[in-house]
């Protein structure tokens, strides 16, 4: 199955998202595969059997969100120099969202830009992170604050790579599926309420539908000037959760799940979402074994961290909120008092 990306409004860039068994790939240039030890142990042999290139190298970087840093990207760049890559060379991102983001960012900078392709191996990266050209790294100030919009040459999504995915990683990917359903497609929410997330056919349908929704959004708005910002539902809150816990306690999808709960609470406060709808979302998150509780230790600190979010501008915070199930609204004029009142409902005092 092919899902096209057609960015005709900005760069006239076109490429395909290929969903299905990974095909044989032949490149008449030098290729560097970027991966981590976990993915390498399970799947590198399979990938190497599929890839043919004039020169093929593998660069392995540490596994984990805490290594999504400029230092790691510099190490990848150094490997590219050591292997004498030129402007016709190509990188392959082989792993989850962390690998994809760092490899794409490296490709955007090496000799001012070389091509790369995405071969995502986690559900989160297959349904979301590998599609759309967002690349970057984290800093102590926040998540993905350094990066670039840089589109891949192609994306190859092979669901069989998910067979070795730990249950917790799988659940983190479901969070991104639920995010898109709640924001854009009430019928998709209903579908998800009535299926077993781990059923093979359901997994394929979740990937297909999520990729189609993501492609539809990105084709309209590559650089997040409008509707693409809606894909950050749950992320404004979730990024603060990740930062407060040093990117070690929660997987990205788990933090997004918590962020969705918080965003829903704010939407209820603004009469945009009902408690019943919020309960439906919480039930779906818990069905996927995702966390739905978080205790905020310092509300003022949590609130101040919003201003380091990429979506904040001119002292105003943009919140992506559900406006009824399957609909969305970007709101940027919410008073500090209202937001902090909602945050206080997640504080230590409220939870004791």
Image (cartoon, rainbow, N blue to C red):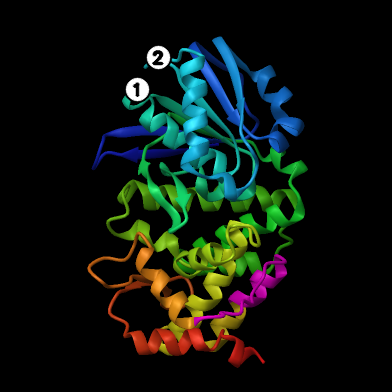
289 falls in the magenta region:
yes
Q: State how far apart marks 1 and 2 are (Cα).
A: 7 Å
Residue drawn at the location 49% of the way across and 67% of the way down: 240
Residue 185 visible to an observer of this rendering: no
Residue 34 marker: none
Return the residue at label 2.
86
Circle 1/circle 2 CB separation < 8 Å: yes
Residue 87 picture quarter: top left
On the image, the x and y values in percent for residue 307 come to 35, 68
What secondary structure is found at the residue carrying circle 2? Answer: loop
For this view, does 249 lie left or right of residue 267?
A: right
Q: In which quarter of the image is the N terminus?
A: top right
What secondary structure is found at the residue carrying circle 1? Answer: helix
For this view, does 69 lie left or right of residue 94?
A: left
The residue lying toward the viewer, choosing from 23 and 117, is 117
On the image, the x and y values in percent for residue 236 come to 44, 67
Residue drawn at the location 23% of the way across and 42% of the way down: 9
Q: In which quarter of the image is the C terminus?
A: bottom right
Mark found first going from the N terminus, 1 or 2: 2
Above or below residue 77? Residue 289 is below
The residue lying toward the viewer, choosing from 346 and 231, is 346
Residue drawn at the location 48% of the way across and 49% of the way down: 212
Crowdedness near tag 1: few (<14), some (14–19) or many (≥20) residues, C-alpha within 10 Å: few
On the image, the x and y values in percent for residue 124 come to 59, 51
On the image, the x and y values in percent for residue 253 come to 59, 59
Crowdedness near tag 2: few (<14), some (14–19) or many (≥20) residues, C-alpha within 10 Å: some
Where are the magenta residues, as a range? 281-298
Residue drawn at the location 53% of the way across and 72% of the way down: 260
Residue 347 visible to an observer of this rendering: yes
Return the residue at label 1.
111
69 falls in the magenta region:
no
């Amino acid at each position: 199955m092919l899902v096209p990306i057609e960015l005709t409004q900005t760069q006239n860039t076109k490429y395909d998202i290929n969903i299905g068994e990974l095909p044989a790939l032949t490149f008449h240039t030098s290729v560097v595969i970027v991966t981590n030890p976990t993915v390498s142990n399970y799947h590198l042999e399979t990938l190497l059997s599929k890839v043919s290139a004039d020169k093929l190298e593998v660069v392995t970087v540490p596994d984990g969100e805490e290594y999504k840093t400029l230092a790691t990207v510099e190490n990848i760049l150094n490997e590219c120099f050591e292997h004498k890559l030129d402007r016709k060379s190509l990188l392959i991102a082989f792993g989850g969202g962390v690998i994809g983001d760092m490899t794409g960012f490296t490709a955007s900078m090496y000799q001012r830009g070389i091509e790369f392709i995405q071969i995502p191996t986690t559900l989160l990266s297959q349904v979301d992170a590998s599609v759309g050209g967002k690349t970057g790294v984290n800093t102590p100030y926040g998540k993905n604050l350094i990066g670039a919009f840089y589109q891949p040459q192609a994306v190859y999504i092979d669901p069989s790579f998910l067979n070795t995915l730990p249950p917790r990683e799988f659940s983190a990917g479901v969070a991104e599926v639920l995010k898109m359903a709640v924001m854009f497609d009430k019928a998709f929410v209903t579908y998800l309420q009535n299926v077993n997330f781990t059923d093979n056919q359901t997994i394929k349908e979740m990937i297909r539908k999520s990729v189609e929704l993501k492609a539809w959004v990105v084709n309209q708005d590559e650089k997040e000037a409008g509707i693409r910002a809606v894909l950050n539902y749950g992320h404004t809150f979730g990024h603060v959760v990740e930062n407060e816990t040093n990117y070690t306690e929660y997987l990205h999808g788990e933090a997004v799940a918590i962020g969705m709960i918080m965003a829903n609470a704010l939407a209820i406060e603004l009469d945009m979402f009902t408690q019943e709808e919020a309960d439906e979302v919480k039930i779906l998150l818990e069905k996927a074994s995702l966390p739905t509780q978080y205790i905020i230790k310092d509300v003022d600190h949590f609130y101040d961290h919003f201003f380091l979010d990429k979506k904040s501008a001119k002292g105003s915070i943009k919140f992506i909120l559900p406006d009824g199930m399957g609909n969305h609204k970007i709101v940027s004029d919410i008073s500090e008092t209202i937001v902090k009142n909602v945050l206080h409902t997640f504080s230590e005092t409220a939870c004791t």
